[in-house]
Amino acid sequence: MLTQIESAVRPFGLDVRSDADNALTRGRAWWKTGTGVSVCIAVSTVVAHVVTGGRYGFDRDELMALGDARHLAWGYVPYPPMTPFFGRIALTLFGTSLVGFRFFSAVAQAVALVLTGLMAKELGGGKWAQVIATLAGVPFSLGGGSLMQYVSFDYVCWVIVAYAMLRLLNSEDPRAWLGVGAGIGSGMMAKYTMGFLALGVMAGVLLTQERRHLRNRWLWGGVLLAIAIFLPNFLWQWQRNFVSLEFLRFIHARDVRVGVTDWFLLGQAKMTLLAFPLAMAGIYFYFFTEPGKRYRPMGWMYAVPLGLFLLMRGRDYYLAPAYPMLYAAGAVWCERWLSSLRYESAARVQTAMRTALVADIVLAAAIALPIAPVNSTWWRLSSKVCIVFPDEIGWPEFVQTVAQVRDQLPAEERARTGILAGNYGEVDALNFYGEEYGLPRAISGVNSSWERGYGDPAQTLIVAGYSRDVLEQHFASCQLAARAWNKYGIPNEETTEHPEIFVCRGLKESWAEFWKRMRTFA
């Protein structure tokens, strides 16, 4: 049949076989390009998350996101609405699957990796630069994509803004400001630290020749687009006296008090690992090379957030989303530098760089992915670095214990019994796993749970996460009924800080007054 078709079309100058073969060749060739390899690397990280993501359990922060996903709103006390929004989509598509709930976080990190490679391409890099830049971003991607958390979405929004700025600087097409604005507005719906990058963009415009854009309507169109995207959350905050600012002040004071902000600069080495020299090369490219002069606003987009986070004592990971644009520039600078070396010297440097970046990936995978057997030596080492792992253990046992306490109450008392939890992990675990046991909706005064109220006032409360001294201030009697535990014996907040589970009766004040006193941040 193919021979007959070829005979029919040959008089018209067409070659069916060669066109088909060329199409297949082009398809195969694309996967060998820098962009194709970047996509393959990014997809492999998603596969790694899907394969390993169901190993332990939901993290405390994930349970909060899951609870908020069931109560969609334009804002929440601890964060803007993007993370619960994607959580709701995940619940709709995948049900209560742990791997499914984490899927969009992994995809967001994969998108950031692809954009990192594309930034290297925009800067004039070849295949080697694109691949190196992408590999440099993989370690954080493995950690950031392992949980459904705002960090993942904040990260990809920073990278989107950086990529849009590069497109603007390269194309001279002012319509790219709409992409910048969309990225900033979306980032503000993920995490408020996007405001620091927005200030970096502003500095990049004001301190370079890009000041000419201030008279361009597309720049102001981008500003309006960012405001329009963020406006629903802003109005939500307005209606609640900007409660998130109060929350953030509380969290920041806690972070400063316990010392987690003391080593911000040193923490940048932890964010970049062995890719740190590549990031430094990126800074050098933007600020001190002639080819980089055109892209100097990108340097300010790193330098301004760095200075502000240092001045305001932010946590080290707040700046992590700024490194992909440095990796891209650093890889391009290295590629050009290597071209000036002798072949043997360049080959040795290339081998050393690939080895270092692969070592970073292996180390990050061993620590950040939930693959170590619980209580193994490997687990003990990884959980000291990735401190969320202990908080992924024991939630089903915790809820089962509360259900057993409920079942031990007299039948006539159970109908009038409620559940009060002291932290967001406990309340959302109870409302998630508690459905299996027919538990009533748990309430809590923490974060957005307080806004959802206490429902029908209960006469008897099963209380977890509080000390006896605190509870006896509000109740006539509180009896110790059980203690939180987990089958692995892993120490975490539930088993060490307030493991007691009480049955309390006789509230000494009205529920309205009691609820006012229960409000807290965590």
Image: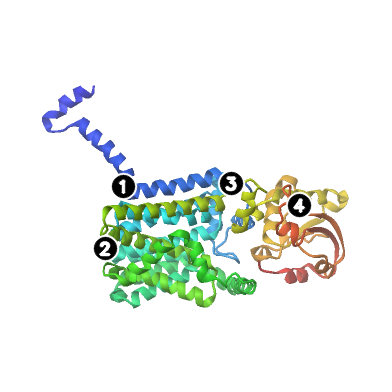
Circle 2 residue: 171
Q: Residue 357: x percent and y percent?
A: 43, 54
What separation in Å lies between label 4 and label 1 (alpha carbons)? 52 Å
Is 121 in front, or is 406?
A: 121
Circle on res. 99:
none
Disc with the residue nearer the chain's start (4 vs 3): 3
Q: Residue 206: x percent and y percent?
A: 34, 77
What separation in Å lies between label 2 and label 4 (alpha carbons)? 59 Å
- In the displayed structure, 49 sits above or below 451; it is above
Is 416 in front, or is 495?
A: 495
Is 396 in front, or is 280?
A: 280
- Colour theme: rainbow
**Quarter holding residue 516:** bottom right
Q: Are marks 2 and 4 in contact (CB under 8 Å)?
A: no
The amino acid marked with disc number 1 is Thr
**Quarter holding residue 243:** bottom right
Q: Residues within 10 Å of mark 3 (few under 14, many from 20)?
A: some
Circle on res. 485:
4
**Quarter holding residue 54:** top right
Disc with the residue nearer the chain's start (4 vs 1): 1
Circle 3 residue: 371
Which element carries disc 3, helix, strand or loop?
loop
Q: Are marks 3 and 2 in contact (CB under 8 Å)?
A: no
Most distant residue in the left direction: 11
Which element carries disc 2, helix, strand or loop?
helix
Circle 1 residue: 33
The amino acid marked with disc number 4 is Trp
Disc with the residue nearer the chain's start (1 vs 3): 1
Q: Are marks 4 and 1 in contact (CB under 8 Å)?
A: no
